[in-house]
Amino acid sequence: MTTTTVATVAGFAAVLVTFLAAHQVADYWVQTCHQAGTKGGPGWPGRLACARHVATYTLTLVMMLGAVIWVTGLSVSLTGLLVGQTVSAVSHYIADRRTPLRALACAIGSREFWNLGAGHLGSGAAALDQSWHTGWLWLAALLTVAL
């Protein structure tokens, strides 16, 4: 491996770990009770609650990445940051509106898993939601470092 390759791999690892940690903070500590309870609801109240959550979520990711950049000297381009955060924000909004993710789960034959434990934090819907976020955060981290 070249020095550049090692730096890129290390940068990707640092960004991914940061995004995964920031996701937990933003989704469970920063998000308000109102946003959590309303973001999947119908009409403009649901859309606006979701948009506000995604805005604070994105700000949390950027602030935590900023801390990593400041402490480690990691180099991230503005293009990489913007593209990565766009992927993260759009995918997060889609999932948190609930209907698109539920429709996808049903379309791929996972309706029964989606409904498992409905109404509880440990539900199938919650597991599919979190795995969706993790997959898109992986792509967001990759794009952040690659561009």
Image (cartoon, grey):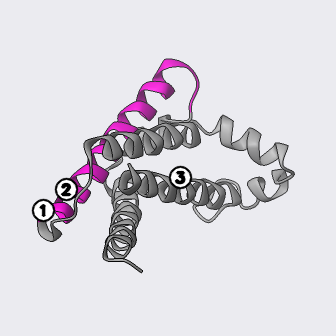
Q: Disc 1 marks which residue?
A: 70
Residue at numbered disc 2: 66
SS for callout 1: helix
User: Could one spot residue 11 in this view of the protein?
Assistant: yes
Q: Position of residue 145 (x, y in %)?
A: 36, 57
- Image point 37% across, 60% down: which residue? 19
**Badge 3 local density, few (<14 within 10 Å), some, or many (20+)?**
some
Q: Is residue 1 above or below residue 101?
A: below
Give, as a single range, the part of the protein colored magenta: 41-70
Three-letter code for the amino acid on which mark 1 is drawn: Trp
Please say if the residues under marks 3 and 2 sit with CB atoms less than 8 Å apart: no
Q: Are marks 2 and 1 in contact (CB under 8 Å)?
A: yes
Instruction: Between residue 125 and residue 141, name the one nearer to us.
Output: 141
Q: Where is mark 3, residue-wise?
A: 136
Q: Tell me the element at label 3.
A: helix
**What percent of the width, then of the height, locates residue 18?**
33, 65
Residue 18 in the image: above or below residue 60 = below
> Three-letter amino acid code at disc 3?
Trp
Amino acid under disc 2: Gly
In terms of image quadrants, where is residue 49?
top left
Classify residue 95 by image quadrant: top right
Instruction: Indicate whether 93 appears above or below 64.
Output: above
Question: Could you tell me how far apart the alpha carbons at marks 3 and 2 are, in whole angstroms?
Answer: 20 Å
Residue at mark 2 to residue at mark 1: CA–CA distance: 6 Å
Cα–Cα gap, marks 3 and 1: 24 Å
Which quadrant does the N terminus fall into?
A: bottom left
Q: Which residue is located at x 34 percent, y 60 percent?
A: 22
121 left or right, relative to 36: right
